[in-house]
């Protein structure tokens, strides 16, 4: 093992190698921190000012974001939700509205992507019939169960007759004997 001079240590790095290394480190940093460099395609925050070509587009946008459900929050529209997915959905609705898509086209796109559940008021179809009928079905089942309980109680009360000795004991109790 020599403690002498290392000839490779004093040689300069090949040109471009330091720049490539710097780029790789920067890419790793960006990926590690999760920095979003996508710019205008990022999601739209609640209350973020938006520009529209006309009032009809603005009305359509706000109408749609109040009709579409956030599939993450499930009980909120994308208008109310602060979830990242809702922000992305608002962004998509905004882009499509600005590009001239109709309300029906946007709802069709969202439904094809997320299913009928994305609609806050899903249409009455074969696959959504249970959603629409279930409240009434539960009401009918509850009413039938309640009627059965009332009938059984009446029958039990009518069938409960006292024997002769029980009647005499009851009469003695009433008289105070």
Image (cartoon, rainbow, N blue to C red):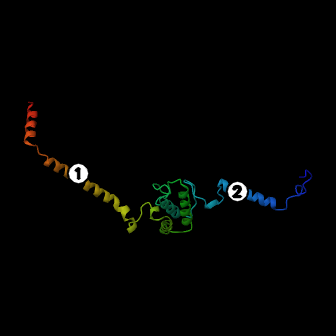
Residue nearer the viewer, 144 or 1:
1
Residue nearer the viewer, 167 or 71:
167
Q: Is residue 84 visible?
A: yes
> What's the distance in space between the residues labelled 1 and 2, CA to CA?
69 Å
Q: Which residue is mark 1?
A: 149
Q: Is residue 125 visible?
A: no
169, above or below 88, in the image = above
Q: Which residue is mark 2?
A: 28
Residue drawn where x is 28% and y is 54% of the image: 142
- For mark 1, give the secondary structure: helix
Residue drawn where x is 73% and y is 56% of the image: 26
Q: Position of residue 157 (x, y in %)?
A: 16, 47
Mark 1 is surrounded, within 10 Å at the Cα level, by few (under 14), some (14 to 19) or many (20 or more) other residues, namely: few
What number is the disc on residue 62? none
Sequence-wise, which precedes: disc 1 or disc 2? 2
Q: Quadrant of residue 92?
A: bottom right
177, above or below 167, in the image = above
Q: Position of residue 71 (x, y in %)?
A: 49, 59
Residue nearer the viewer, 52 or 118:
118
């Amino acid at each position: 093992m020599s403690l002498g001079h290392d000839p490779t240590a004093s040689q300069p790095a090949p040109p471009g190698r330091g720049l490539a290394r710097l780029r790789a480190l920067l890419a790793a940093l960006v990926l590690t921190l999760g920095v979003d460099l996508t710019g205008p395609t990022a999601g739209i925050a609640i209350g973020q000012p938006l520009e529209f070509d006309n009032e009809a587009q603005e009305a359509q946008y706000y109408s749609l974001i109040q009709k579409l459900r956030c599939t993450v929050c499930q009980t909120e529209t994308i208008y109310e939700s602060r979830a990242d997915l809702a922000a992305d959905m608002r962004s998509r609705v905004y882009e499509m509205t600005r590009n001239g898509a109709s309300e029906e086209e946007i709802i069709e796109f969202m439904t094809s992507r997320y299913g009928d559940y994305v609609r806050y008021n899903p249409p009455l179809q074969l696959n959504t019939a249970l959603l629409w009928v279930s409240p009434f079905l539960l009401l009918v089942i509850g009413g039938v169960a309640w009627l059965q309980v009332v009938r059984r109680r009446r029958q039990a009360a009518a069938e409960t007759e006292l024997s002769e000795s029980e009647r005499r004991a009851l009469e003695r109790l009433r008289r105070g004997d």
